[in-house]
Image (cartoon, rainbow, N blue to C red):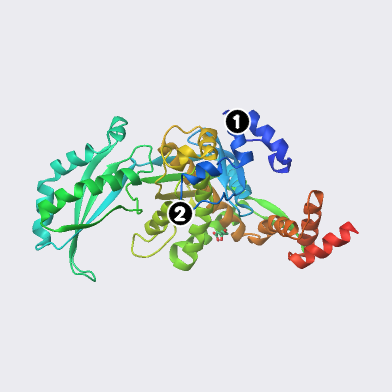
Amino acid sequence: MTTSRISGFYNMTLEERRAKLADASPLTPPELAAWTSGGLSAEAADHMIENVVGLHSLPLGIALNFMVNGRDVLVPMAIEEPSVVAGASFMAKLARAGGGFTATTTEPHMIGQMQVINVVNLYEAKLKLYEHKAELLAEADSIDPVLKKFGGGARDLEVRVIEDSPIGGFLVVHLIYDVRDAMGANAVNTACERLAPKVEAITGGKVHLRILSNLADRRLARARCTIPVKELAFETTTQDGILRYSGEEVRDGIIAAYAFAAADPYRAATHNKGIMNGVDAVVIATGNDWRAIEAGAHAYAARSGRYTSLSTWGKDADGNLVGTLEMPMAVGIVGGATKVHPAAQAAVKLMGVKTASELAEIIVSVGLAQNLAALRALATEGIQRGHMSLHARQVAIAAGASGELIEKVASQMVAEKVVRIDRAEEILKELQA
Ligand code: MEV
């Protein structure tokens, strides 16, 4: 991959974009075909879940301009919402002017939980477990030889006392497991199930639940970017003439928008939803478990006891806009749908990632870019303008427009500021008359 910048991509036809992607990416024609055919066969799907009757598709777009840790990357995004791919690409372009995204991850440590009930003395049992820690870790470590071969395995054991709950007190044992390039649910759940009899013998209690925690706060991904303040200046044409925004105005507007999310959970939920627009789209494109990522993100956002923003926005000493994002990122590139879904394999190959950590670093960068796109729009001209033109296209299609008529019907609705199916039908009739 030499560059993630492809000029004019947005205005190309579907076929032209496919041809450009074939030139710009390391994917072979059969690999690229995974996105034209939908990738997954019904037969393969039949082995993935129960009661299969078919497949369900989503649009797959490519976000441009991303530079993560100095490397250009074309980012596949599977999402039904207009403006998301364009927003990410545009913000990646602004971030590029400040050196792109710098991203890191912690070690890929997942937490497996064991709930130990019917324990006579919780504090005594807790210490007994610590006394047997080495032995418990050795047992957990031997469970997955493949993971061990790749450097993974059991890392730590922690015991928490829950003093009071609807069933009284109990113990929670956390098994910290390095899952390397896997999402890790299977490895961690298996390890917890295997350790349970030993934990029961040590504590005299009963191990009830044995399952990983989606609050993967030992497996974090972090990204930051600096947007040169001059890059934020822009002008836009409205009904009332040309509106001009200085870079400082936009920067301060974004910081004030962030402050709203930092202070108010009602706004933070929407702010974080904007981040997840970017995160989930890549998580889905790579065949990862987006429910796990969602659960982890929102639990992490509430870790202080008050739900707040996952990102921060402020300025540096030179007055440039600085954004940061930190969140759990339990994604894998081996096993599960990432391995059996041809479109997910194509997505991983397109990004050139060799480890789950590299994938996590790209995903968190896309989340930050997406957050910036939303805040920039909200802090200036409002979100509807950008949204409306693509939404109008969808309404035009729903009204029966095809080919060139889609754009014609959509533009007229946007110009009239009436984006409704009944109006689309009328315009379509007029154009076809
Ligand atoms: C819409 O999908 C996402 C936004 O609501 C995010 C935000 O408000 O920050 C635009």
Residue at the far bottom: name it.
Answer: 166
| Residue 418 in sight from this viewpoint | no
Q: Amino acid at mark 1?
A: Pro
Above or below residue 170? Residue 53 is: above
**Mark seen at residue 46:** none
Above or below residue 251? Residue 346 is: above
| Residue 194 in sight from this viewpoint | yes
Q: Is 319 left, or right, of 404 in this rendering?
A: left
Q: Closer to the camera: disc 1 or disc 2?
A: 1
* Quarter of the render that holds ligand 1: bottom right
Residue position for label 2:
312
Is residue 112 or residue 363 the one in the foreground? 112
Q: Amino acid at mark 2?
A: Thr
Q: Is 246 left, or right, of 419 in this rendering?
A: left
Residue at the far right: name it.
Answer: 433
Q: Identify the image quadrant of residue 383.
A: bottom right
Q: Is 265 left, or right, of 156 in this rendering?
A: right
Above or below residue 27? Residue 44 is: below
Residue position for label 1:
30
Is residue 308 or residue 55 the one in the foreground? 55
Q: CA distance from mark 1 to mark 2?
A: 42 Å
Q: Secondary structure at mark 2?
A: strand
Q: Residue at x 44, y 66 (%)?
A: 265
Closer to the chain start, of discs 1 and 2, is 1
Q: Where is residue 141 shown, x and y percent of the image?
A: 22, 38
Q: Secondary structure at mark 1?
A: helix
